[in-house]
Amino acid sequence: MTNCDIKDKNLAPAGKRRIEWAERDMPVLSLVKEKFSKSQILSGKKMSACLHITAETANLARALKAGGADIVLCASNPLSTQDDVAASLVVDYGIPVYAIKGEDNKTYYRHLIAAVEHSPVVTMDDGCDLVSAISAKHPEIAKQIIGSMEETTTGVIRLKAMERDGALKFPVFAVNDAQTKNLFDNRYGTGQSTVDGIIRATDFLIAGKNIVVAGYGWCGKGFAMRCKGMGANVIVCEINPVKAIEAAMDGFRVMTMAEAAPIGDLFCTLTGDMHVLRPEHFSEMKNGAIICNSGHFDIEIDIKGLKKIAKEEKKNVRNFVDQFILPSGRSIFLLAEGRLVNLGAAEGHPASVMDMSFSTQALATEYAIINADKLKHKVYDVPQEIEDWVATAKLKSMGITIDKLTPEQVKYLASWQEGT
Ligand code: ADE
């Protein structure tokens, strides 16, 4: 019997179909799985992974298990779990899972503790909750950890704060910061899946709408680009002056949130920071304005502040849509409880892009194990050779070949004498 706390084991057949469907689009991860099956690099290693429980994550877990890992999974967000996938992982693949879509905060942390109690030597995180729990309350486990992988921007920011405070007790790899992750997953993955979540939740027509994008990092850029491509008038709000110029030169209107509030039809936060949308903005919004978040935590929209100023709240006027009626009589619609709309109301990023992110995760894990005796208690970048391996394999799977430098070009690039 595989340990678990999931919604319903009878959902397993549907989950298995989803996992297999995703696998078709994850050729690089399949290569990693083959490599791990042969090397057994993770043999006997206890692993805990706090990730979004999706079909793509299931394929990552299968690859790690094929390499010999004794792995358990818990959710990295209360709303992102695909219950059928969780069931299939337990029933068909014998992988313990602690995750139920819509779980309350207490259950979320109970599940996290189950992953801690597995007593891992390797961890994976999407948001740093597992590392944070282990570091704060379980020094005996922190001591045994060989390496930890972090999947998302918010998690890397937390880890760097831990490193600065001397609180980091084991080596960590910032998988998010690998180009094979953020240039594709953050940009094209978030771009597409955020549009997908909004459309599934609302049936909203993008064309002709004023869409306000808060944050112009890779996620914000991806979302803004997709909305523009679908005919929206995109407005960008950004606090970083360089990124703000970039947004302006990419052809977007750039302004403050106070200026954008009365104009926007839909607002999406992708900043990683708190209270980007707050009461002073809500009260200026048009009747029917839609607000959502695609950043990691549900802090980007001040929901408590919205509840405080609303005279009435109607839950679930449509799946994943709550209505707030303000004293002015105007309504604001909040999607997916302010949690990441792409995973709450849709299926997260497509498998094809997670293929690169999760191959990078898996190979960083292999690297951490092979180099365990050399690594310090630091936040490491993913080594370039892993990025090159993943990019080369992905290109090959896409049927793309690229040019190679000629010997003359190699020599030229290595020289400094030749000029005009
Ligand atoms: N993060 C964003 N999309 C995801 C997905 N499909 N699976 C796992 N993590 C994700």
Image (spheres, rainbow, N blue to C red):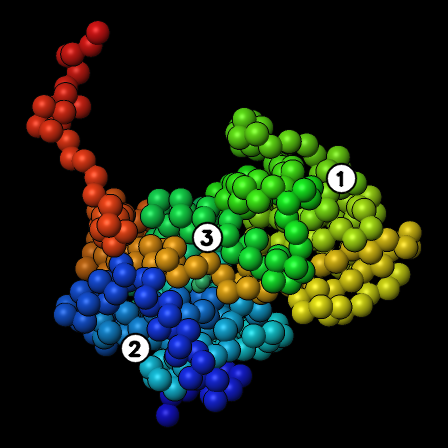
Which circle marks residue 263 in the picture?
1
Name the residue tied to disc 2: 70
Q: Is mark 1 within 8 Å of ligand 1?
A: no
Q: Which residue does the image show at 38% across and 67% down from the upper left?
A: 22
Residue 376 x, y percent position in the rendering:
29, 52
Point out the tag, 2 or 3, that comes first from the N-terminus. 2
Q: Residue at x 74, y 64 (%)?
A: 322
Q: Earlier in the sequence, mark 1 or mark 3?
A: 3
Element carrying mark 2: strand
For this view, does 280 lie left or right of residue 156?
A: right
Q: Nearer the viewer, residue 355 or 364?
A: 355
Q: Give residue 100's position: percent from left, percent from top.
A: 54, 77
Is residue 141 in view? no
* Mark 2 neighbour density, 10 Å: few (under 14) some (14–19) many (20 or more): many
* Vertical comparison of 40 with 27: above or below: below
Q: Is residue 242 above or below residue 260?
A: above
Label 1 crowd bin: few (<14), some (14–19), many (20+), radius 10 Å: some
* Residue tagged 3: 189
Give the position of the C terminus as an image quadrant.
top left
| Label 3 residue near ligand 1, CB within 8 Å | yes
Q: CA distance from mark 1 to mark 2?
A: 52 Å
The answer to whether 64 appears left or right of 405 in the picture is right
